[in-house]
Amino acid sequence: MIKRITLLTICFICTLFVFNACQVEQDIELKEAKLNLPATAHTYAGLPAQFKKLEFFNNNGFIAGIPDSDFQNHFIENPLNPEITDDGATLGRVLFYDAKLSINNSISCASCHNQSLAFADGLSSSKGFGGKRTPRNAMAIVNIVTNRNLFWDSREQSAKGLILKPIQNHIEMGMESLADLETKIASTDYYPELFKKAYNSEQVTSEKIADAMAQFLCSMVSADSKFDQGFADDFNNFSTLEMVGKDLFFSERTQCSGCHAGANFSAPDQPGGEYGSSGGENRRGTANIGLDLVSKDKGLENGKFRIPSLRNIALTAPYMHDGRFENLTAVIEHYDKGIQAHPELDDKFVSNTGEPVRMNLNSLEKQALIAFLNTLTDESFITDQRFSNPFQD
């Protein structure tokens, strides 16, 4: 009798759990958010002028070891990206924040890319539509207009090529059928007018969805940090500690700028010159930085992962593809004395003796590097209304 009562109790609890789960799912389905867009569309644009002043970076050692041809091929707008229009980027903004792009209306692109965190999410792995965790850290979105290789393994070559991948991913947003996505968006009351303004037609296609969202992503330009403000004035706005950190960053000793180069502080995608382990190898903007002796996640290949932009880096912890480092201190400790002797370790991190490089920075030098990295934070970028959530609860 006791066993029977226990069994009935368990069945009741399980039934209640299933009911509650369905209710949560139903609440997600029924929830409607209201758009709050300006009467006149915001103005959206691409890169500012300083990103195209190649001679400045050439003359100041910002591109140590990287040939001019590689630099010029990378640090300009990617021709595979679409032209940015105000109405197109506005549509992209709405789509970016709309949870309807997921299978159960629970996850939007902004769920893993939070503006206050420079469009990262502060997690080592992100939560998908069914509660599962992604295998890699969500990369911050910053100045994507320059990038030719995207994701941690550089598998996509443009913002437009990137867009539909997370939407269709079986962990992230789960919308495996693009036809279902098109139907779902077309049946949402606020989209016909937005598509009409952007494309002179109310017809919804996955091609237009990708194009509009790519326009929005490519308009997310961060170029108003303390570094940028000091750019034209010999960095007179820097403290002594920040100047020491800047000099260290661009020094032969640390070689930070050998990977994090140019106005975007990121890696060029083309091979050549001293950059890369063999000069002629196309590494697609990646490097093996000796995180492990044996790579569990192979990345592009053999433990090579995308070298991200350092802009807003102070806001985008945790760091690396698996979010293993909680703060910048841990990152610098890795480069200082924690690099592992992986067989495919980038040449930059191999000493003359064949062992991993040890910089042996002192405490003040480490603090100075962090101080300099903090100057790359763009407060206006993380509060810019053009990139903010257009929905009201």
Image (cartoon, helix red, strand yellow):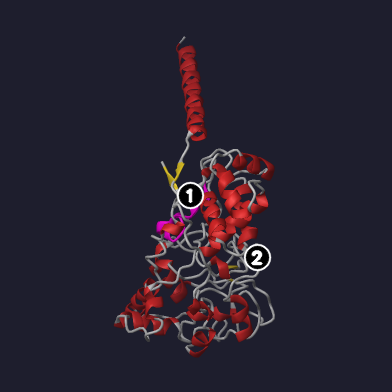
Residue 295 as seen in the image, left or right of residue 2 = right
The kind of residue on which mark 1 rests is: Ser
Residue 277 as seen in the image, left or right of residue 240 = right
Q: Position of residue 242 (x, y in %)?
A: 34, 79
What's the magenta bit mostly, secondary-structure-wise? Answer: loop
Q: Is residue 372 magenta?
A: no
The kind of residue on which mark 2 rests is: Gln
Q: Position of residue 288 (x, y in %)?
A: 58, 71
**SS class, disc 1:** helix
Identify which residue is drawn at 46% across, 58% down: 387
**SS class, disc 2:** loop
Identify which residue is drawn at 37% across, 80% down: 230
Residue 246 visible in the shown view: yes
Instruction: Indicate the quadrant where residue 305 lies.
Output: bottom right
Task: Report the residue marked by disc 2.
Answer: 157
Mark 2 or mark 1: whose residue is earlier in sequence: 1
Identify which residue is drawn at 59% across, 72% down: 77
The residues colored magenta run 108-125
Alpha carbon distance from label 2 to label 1: 23 Å
